[in-house]
Image (spheres, grey):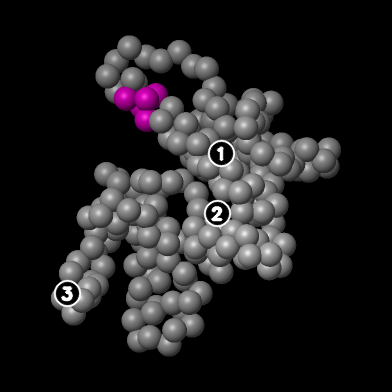
Amino acid sequence: MLLISTTNLDTGMPVVWNIGAIAGSGHPLALDTIRRVLLASAAIPGAFPPVLFDVTVDGRPYQELHVDGGAIAQALLYPEQLGASRRAARAAGRAVFPVRAWLIRNGRIGVLPEATGRRTLSIAQRSVATMLNAGGYHDSLRMYLNAERDGVDFQMTWIGEDFTTPFTTAFDRDYMRALFEYGAARMRAGRIRERRPPLA
């Protein structure tokens, strides 16, 4: 399954789109819908405009505003329905297929200490960065706990505190090369996978 999440701003709820099912539906609007879902999933609130979806509920037409799923959760491991069906099967004594989940967090688990400027913009930037980082950690912890509950083999990796190359600008070649070499070295040392987030 290729699943993509967005946030429905009108309901304040996450929406999980099964892109494979949409693509295989044969519906004439399937391609346009997939393109709109991709746009919405990248529509960072405040930075990019939301995407409008025309929907029909109980025969009445509506429009929904969707933005990046990160407004609610930075990552999606699997939909709750999958976990619920596995729990029900196990409770009934039925066999379930083994499932392994891999989570790659393209970031650090914690915020590196840094002196914060005393101006409003610096404080706001540092506050947002701290909030996003904490949200990412809590998402990782939630996914780990859900996987444990549902009998899913969970493994994850992230950028550790031992990676010290300073970040300057997005897509900086020297930074990206250093990060690639860091990941390759961890792979060679057998330190690329962890069974749970730190402090879990």
State which region is magenta. 124-128
Residue at image coords 49%, 58%? 80
Q: Amino acid at mark 3?
A: Pro
Query: Spatial distance from mark 1 to mark 3, Cα to Cα?
Result: 39 Å
N-terminal label among 1 and 2 = 2
Q: Which residue is mark 3?
A: 61
Residue 150: numbered disc: none
Query: Spatial distance from mark 1 to mark 2, Cα to Cα?
Result: 11 Å
Task: Residue lying at the far right in this picture: please name it.
Answer: 189
Most foreground residue, 104 or 154? 154
Query: Considering the numbered disc 1 on the image, is that residue within a helix, a strand or a loop?
Result: helix
Question: How many C-alpha atoms fall within 10 Å of the one at disc 2: few (<14), some, or many (≥20)?
Answer: some
Query: Spatial distance from mark 2 to mark 3, Cα to Cα?
Result: 31 Å
Residue at image coords 53%, 35%? 137
Query: Considering the numbered disc 3 on the image, is that residue within a helix, a strand or a loop?
Result: strand
Question: How many C-alpha atoms fall within 10 Å of the one at disc 3: few (<14), some, or many (≥20)?
Answer: few
